[in-house]
Image (cartoon, helix red, strand yellow):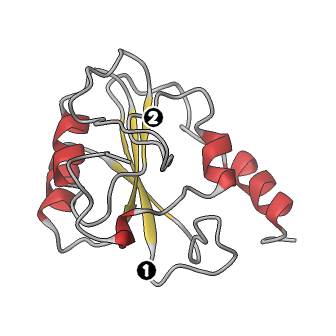
């Protein structure tokens, strides 16, 4: 798979947890996990639609820069690392950071060795919250996380 040049290491191949994919169902994904498809999502012209990205974790910076300049809402699933340049750029661009409680499993059944965050860039903020707490609680109940 080609998401942004050749992968420097295997740690870039993290599937998105299914409950997160359900939240962003119908959003354009220029960086899908599919080892059988060669796709350079950075070279694509992204349609004027909401975008969800789980970028390569070794270098999310080019994805963050493109997301900041996109004309519609963008959600990025990232390692939670506020010491990075890309985190600073997202903060300066007015991103909303949704911290993931616990560790994602990336569809492996084992928790990741790092925390995650959803960074939301919204060009035209919707009325009310982007995701209701009820919606997130419902997903948690399906996973048996908050019973």
Q: Where is residue 47 shown, x and y percent of the image? A: 35, 16
The front one of 64 and 90 is: 64
Q: At 73% across and 46% down in the image, what residue appears?
A: 135
Q: Which residue is disc 1 drawn over?
A: 114
Q: Residue furthest right?
A: 147
Give the quarter of the image for residue 132. top right
- The label shown at residue 18 is none
Q: Where is residue 55 shown, x and y percent of the image? A: 35, 52
Q: Residue furthest front?
A: 36
The front one of 17 and 129 is: 17
Few, some or many C-alpha atoms within 10 Å of disc 2 (few <14, some 14-19, many ≥20)?
many
Q: At 36% across and 32% down in the image, what residue appears?
A: 122
Discs 1, 2 touching: Cβ within 8 Å: no
Few, some or many C-alpha atoms within 10 Å of disc 1 (few <14, some 14-19, many ≥20)?
few
Q: Which residue is disc 2 drawn over?
A: 29
Q: In the drawing, does residue 47 fall left or right of residue 24?
A: left
Q: CA distance from mark 1 to mark 2?
A: 23 Å
Q: How many numbered marks appear?
A: 2
Q: At 23% across and 54% down in the image, what residue appears?
A: 6
The residue mark sitting in front, 1 or 2, is 2
Q: Where is residue 31 shown, x and y percent of the image? A: 39, 42
Q: In the drawing, does residue 77 fall left or right of residue 132?
A: left
Label 2 element class = loop
Q: At 16% across and 69% down in the image, what residue appears?
A: 84
> If the image is split into quadrants, where does the C terminus sit?
bottom right
* Mark 1 / mark 2, whichever is N-terminal: 2
Label 1 element class = loop
Q: In the drawing, does residue 1 fall left or right of residue 129?
A: left
Q: 99 above or below 130?
A: below
Q: 125 above or below 24?
A: above
Q: Where is residue 11 shown, x and y percent of the image? A: 37, 72
């Amino acid at each position: 798979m080609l998401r942004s040049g050749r992968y420097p290491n295997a740690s870039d191949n993290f599937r998105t947890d299914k409950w997160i994919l359900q939240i962003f169902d119908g959003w354009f994904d220029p960086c899908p996990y599919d080892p059988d498809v060669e796709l350079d999502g950075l070279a694509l012209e992204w349609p004027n639609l909401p975008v969800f990205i789980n970028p390569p974790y070794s270098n999310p910076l080019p994805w963050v820069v493109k997301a900041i300049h996109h004309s519609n809402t963008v959600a990025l699933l990232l390692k939670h690392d506020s010491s990075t340049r890309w985190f600073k750029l997202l903060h300066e661009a007015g991103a909303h950071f949704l911290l993931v409680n616990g560790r994602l499993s990336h569809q492996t059944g084992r928790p990741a060795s790092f925390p995650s965050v959803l960074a939301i860039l919204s060009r035209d903020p919707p009325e009310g919250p982007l995701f209701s707490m009820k919606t997130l609680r419902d997903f948690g109940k399906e996973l048996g996380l908050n019973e």
